[in-house]
Each structure stands twice: as C-alpha cells, then as structure tokens.
Image: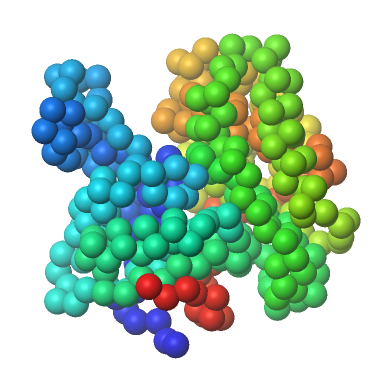
Amino acid sequence: MMIFERDIAIDLGTTNIRVFVRGKGIMLREPSIVAVDKYTGRMLKVGQDAQKMLGRTPANIVAIHPISAGVISDYDMTALMLKELLSRVTSFSLFKPRVLVTVPSSVTGVEERNVIDAVIEAGARKVYLVESAVATAAGAGADLSKPDGHLVIDIGGGSTEIIIGQGMNIRCSFSCQMGAVRLFQRIPIRDHGDLDAVEQIAADILADKLLDYPVLSMPGSWRGTGGTFTTLAAMVKGIYWTDRTYMHGTVLTEADVARFERQLADMTLEQRKQLPGLQPNRADIVVHGICILRAIMRRMHIGQITVSEYGNLDGYFKREYLMGAQKRG
C-alpha cells in the first residue's frame, strides 16, 4: 500500500505529543497536557498553551495528562486534544487524513480500540497502529537490511522501550513501566546520595522483564533515542539545544553517563536550567532519565551507545515495509 500525501503519524507520549506529516517532517511537538475548567469540565487549552496557564490562572483551572505510558488514560480529553492538534496541520485540507499511531508492545486489545476510536473522533479518515519497537529501530538508524544485531533504547516519560533485533527480525521488544516522569513522581533525587535507590528501582523493573525476554549477547550497534539521550549528547558537546542533527550520531560512554548523572544530581533545579544543552522544561526529570539509562547499560553490559535524534515517526516513513506491520482501524 502506498503512502498518500496527507498521511500523518502521531507519537502519543506521556510527556509530549509529536505530529509528523509526510513530506514535511515533525510539524508539532506539544506537551501532553490539557487545561480544564474543573467546575464545567470544559477543555480550555492544550499543549504549550495549557502549560502556560498553569499557576497563573484561577484555581478552577486544572491540568490533565490524558496519556500514560503511550496509551489513553482519559478518553474524552485525548480525543479533544487530538482534534485540536490535528486541526493545526490539516486546516487547509479538503480531505480527512489517514493517521498512523505508534503504540507500545504491551498494548492490550482494549487500549488499541481506544486509540483508534479517539483518533477517528478527532478527524481521521483511517487509523493504523504499528508497534513502536519496529518503527523506533528503523528510525534510530538500525539497518534492518543487514544481518547484524542491533539494540535500541527509547526512554520516554512514562515508559522505556527496548528493542533487540537482528536483520529484519525483531528478536524481542518490550515496554518497561519506567520513564523519566514516572520515576520523578515516584521518588525524589535531592543529591547524588539518592541515585542508587532510583537506579535500583529501574534495575528491578528491567530484571523482571528480562526474565521473560532473555537477552543473548550479540555483536552490532547500540542506539538510544528520546529526550534523555539528546540532552546528554548536547551536554557532552557543550552546545545549547539547536537543530537535532547536531546531536545525532554522538557516542555516549558509560563514563559520560555516570559523570553527568552525579553532576546534575548535586545541582539545584535553577542551576540545571542554566546548563548548555539542557532544555529548561527537562531540568526536573533529566536525572531520573539518566538513572534509567545507567541501569540498562549496567544490566546489559553496554559500554557505549550512539545517540539518534530520529525515532519511531521518522522510522515509519523511512521504511515503507512497516506498512505491512499495521493493524487497521
């Protein structure tokens, strides 16, 4: 099946939603937040506009995070939020778009149905779901046409996807219920003395998953995608957040990760916000994301990992064969 010009892909993240239009790239990158009047239930703003309202408006306006670990936790607000975001990229189109949505490997049938229904309600003509593992592996630069082994780590706000493949085959992929936001909400990090406890939580969650997905050592490439990786890449290079191609391909060693983990843990929130390469809106959760990465690198014996600024949405449109992995709505 060929891809039409109006095809759109959506990455439903706990922290951010990204909307990708074929031929144009990522057109929207908005926080997954809805501002709601708690007395009337009316949606007021979404994304950055909603985030700006918080703390500056009457107490009757509250924030809702309708996405959790890549699936819908509040159906009505998700549908309204998606309708608003899709309207921003399709306002001049006479036709409803076909929309692809990436979903975690652990998604249930009910959760799949909720995603499809919400996107249809938001204005899509057809909805396709694809497991984010395959798309992420392609987008992160793993050459799926070669027989080499590859491992891709995608650290998000609510969950972490780990994909282990060889050639065109995904040997195993799984979603761990540990993300930078999720751990931040669970346990604080006041200084480097708290790091071991947070890393242990991440290591325990990972160990439970690996009981079901035994990992065999393999040669090949190790790649990481997501905000934790690109933030570390920018900090290693000592540059401010700019075009994403500047971070793409940066190699992070375990020593780099450990150094920045300790350095950032001992800083105040305001000090972190002043650092080159660290986006201010990630200053509160960045250390928790790095703790997840360190736990994975230790458990899976990864000495270094290459940063990719291209993730599941890029991978989908770069690899037409992924169309065969879709589940149609």
Q: Position of residue 191 (x, y in %)?
A: 63, 12
Compared to residue 283, the image places residue 166 above or below, namely below
Identify the image quadrant of residue 238. Answer: top right
Q: Spot the residue most to the front.
A: 110
Compared to residue 224, the image places residue 186 above or below, namely above
**Could you tell me which quadrant the C terminus lies in?**
bottom left
Residue located at (52% from left, 56% from top): 107
Q: Nearer the viewer, residue 76 or 293?
A: 76
Compared to residue 58, the image places residue 213 above or below, namely below
Q: Position of residue 237 (x, y in %)?
A: 62, 38
Colour style of the rendered protein structure: rainbow
Compared to residue 243, the image places residue 233 above or below, namely above
Residue located at (56% from left, 37% from top): 179
**Could you tell me which quadrant the N terminus lies in?**
bottom left
Residue located at (28% from left, 30% from top): 63
Q: Nearer the viewer, residue 100 or 238?
A: 100
Does 11 sit left or right of 231 as displayed? Answer: left
Q: Position of residue 55 (x, y in %)?
A: 24, 19
**Residue 9 seen in the figure:** no
Q: Spot the residue most to the left.
A: 40
Count the marks. Answer: 0
Q: Position of residue 54 (x, y in %)?
A: 25, 25
